[in-house]
Amino acid sequence: MRFKKYLNILVIGFSLIVLSCSGEDGLDGAPGNNGNPGLAGENGAPGAPGKNGADATGFDELTKFGYVVLELEGTRSDGLPFTDTTSFRFTPIDLEVALSSHVEYQDTPDGLLHQFYGVRFLSIPDNSYQNTYFSFNVNMINPGEENVQITSFSYSLTKYAVIGDDNKYFILTQTHNNQGPEIQNLQITDVSFDASDNHLIFSFSYTIVGSANATGLPLLMSGFADVYLLEKI
C-alpha cells in the first residue's frame, strides 16, 4: 500500500518535470508542392433549345425594284480631280415604296405622257441614320420608240459623301431640273420601257454648273437607271 502511494507520487513528479521541460514552438516549415490536378468532370446535360427569332427583312425584298448607277467626275474645291461611282439599289418595303417608285399617265395634245418617278437609297432606308438617296423624275412621250420625246427631267442627290483616297471628303446635296440654268448638256438615251411590268431603262448625262454644287466647279453626272415602277389602279 505504501509502495503504491510512492509510485503515484513518482508518476506525478515525472509528469511535472516533462511539462516544465517543454520548449517554445519552432518556425513553420516550407509549403509542400501542389498536388496533381484532378480529372475533369463530365459535361453537363444540354440545355433546352432557345426560341426561334423573328424573320428579318430579306435582302431581295429591298432590292427587287431595280437600281440607279451614278458616276461623278469633276474637281474638288481644293483643286484635285476626282471620279466616283456608286449604285443606289434599295427601296422601302412598306407603303413608302409607292411614293418612291411609280409611273403615272396623262393625255396631252402630243400623245400619252409617261411620268416616271423613282427613288433609290444607298443603303437600307432609315429616316434617322440611312437617308442617302438619288431620285429622278423624267417625263416622256413615246418612251422606247424612235420618236421618244423628253419633256422634263429633274433629280435630287441627298447627303452623298464623296470620299477621296486621301480620306478627305465633301457632301453633295442638290436638287435641279432642266428648266433652270443649273443643268447643262442634258442627254437621256437608250430608253426602254415595258408597260407589262413597268420596267424602265435609260441612260443619262448632264453637267451641273459650279455655282450649283458643293465643289464650286462644273460637275459631270452620268449613269443609268434600270428600275421597276409601280402603277396605281
Image (tube, helix red, strand yellow):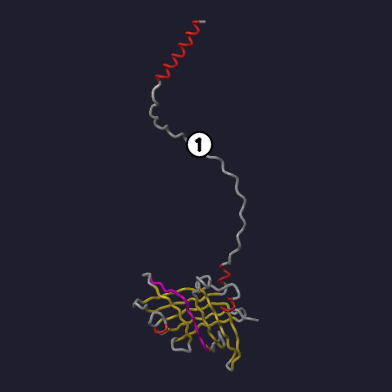
Where is residue 23? Give x, y as percent. Answer: 39, 22
Image: 86 above or below 104 = above
Where is residue 221? Give x, y as percent. Answer: 44, 80
Residue at the image point whose x is 60% and y is 47% from the top: 46
Structural crowding at the residue carrying mark 1, measured as other residues with C-alpha within 10 Å and reported as few (<14), some (14–19) or many (≥20): few
For residue 97, what is the image quadrant? bottom right
| 148 displayed left or right of 208 | right
Q: Amino acid at mark 1?
A: Gly
Where is residue 111? Give x, y as percent. Answer: 59, 91
Q: Nearer the viewer, residue 169 or 86?
A: 169
| 62 displayed left or right of 22 | right
Q: Tell me, yes or no, whether the highlighted magenta stretch contains residue 154.
A: yes
SS majority, magenta: strand
Q: Which residues are magenta?
A: 151-164
Q: Nearer the viewer, residue 73 or 126?
A: 126
Residue at the image point whose x is 53% and y is 70% from the top: 124
Residue that badge 1 annotates: 38
